Amino acid sequence: MRRLTPLFLIALSLGLAAPTLLAQGRRGGNMWDRLSRRDQDKDGKISREEFPGAGRMFDRLDTDGDGFITKAEADARSRGGRGGRGGANTDQLIEKLDADKSGTVDKREWEALFGKADKNGDGKLDKEELQALLSGRDYKDPAPKVGAAIPNVSGKVRGTEQTVALSKPKRHTVLVFGSWT
Amino acid sequence: MYTREAHASDGHRPARHVEIAQPKTWEERTDVAKRCSAALDLKIPQLVDDMKDTIAKAFHGMPDRLFVLGADGKIAFRGERGPRGFDVAAMETALKPLVAPAK
């Protein structure tokens, strides 16, 4: 059997390692590792001209808006996962959830937030409620306002055959919504 | 206006003062409404919402809320959403001038 030369052994080891190295390259290590290769003027930051992606993505990464993406900005994005707005929304959500500021969210805190977010009390969070929760926007009460027409709905009086058209009260009427629980 | 149970015994936050499973039919809801009315000795007429919660959704009235419906067909008072916003005094303040005898 022919003896394997050291050079051949080195080439073999590199060959076996290559797929791993290539895979790491494709995954990028982290974002700055990938971006720094584009730093043509070697100033330690990535300008809009050096950035390989779309302008929108550049703007997302350039969080201080100075026209350059730095290692710190890229690392922040890498740490935050989706980062950008997603990261900000996650921080907002944690701030809303962690009532006792313990740094963790327990079941009671989660359920309390659900109750607050469930504005119409139907036991479900619809898209509007979730958007309001994540965006932190002031909630706009969708219930009919003072001066608005009474909703055109009717209900049957329990224990009778009488149906009441709520939109046409014969006199001023107090309407109380509720349940036993 | 009797609505969906806010804290049904088979829900994620059951009430402590009474054990009521979420009614699955209008008849069940009506029966619960009747028992509630008797237990609380309510004297006011009671409407029971359908199982689609049609009226509660139209008014955004769940879990509990106060309105004053004006004789002119318009909302005369809209209370904040309960339970925190359920303010009987605020409703009375809005109602009194509406029903005060004309001078």
Image (cartoon, coloured by chain):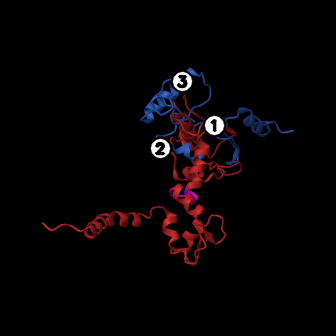
Chain colours: A red, B blue
Label 1 element class: loop
Q: What residue is drawn where x is 51% and y is 50%?
A: A126
Q: Where B65 sits versus A14, above or below?
A: above
At label 3, the amino acid type is: Arg
Q: Where A142 sits versus B9, above or below?
A: below
Q: Comparing marks 2 and 3, which lies closer to the viewer?
A: 3
Q: Out of A43 and A128, give the one closest to the viewer.
A: A43
Residue highlighted by disc 2: B52
Residue found farthest to the right: B103
Q: Position of residue A158 (x, y in %)?
A: 52, 32
Q: Out of A8 and B91, give the one closest to the viewer.
A: A8
Residue A82 belongs to magenta span: yes
Residue A132 belongs to magenta span: no
At label 2, the amino acid type is: Lys
Label 3 element class: loop
Residue highlighted by disc 1: B82
Visible in this render: residue A163?
no
Q: Out of A107 and A65, give the one closest to the viewer.
A: A65
Label 2 element class: loop
The magenta stretch is A81-86
Residue highlighted by disc 3: B16
- The chain holding disc 2 is B
Q: Comparing marks 3 and 1, which lies closer to the viewer?
A: 3
At label 1, the amino acid type is: Gly
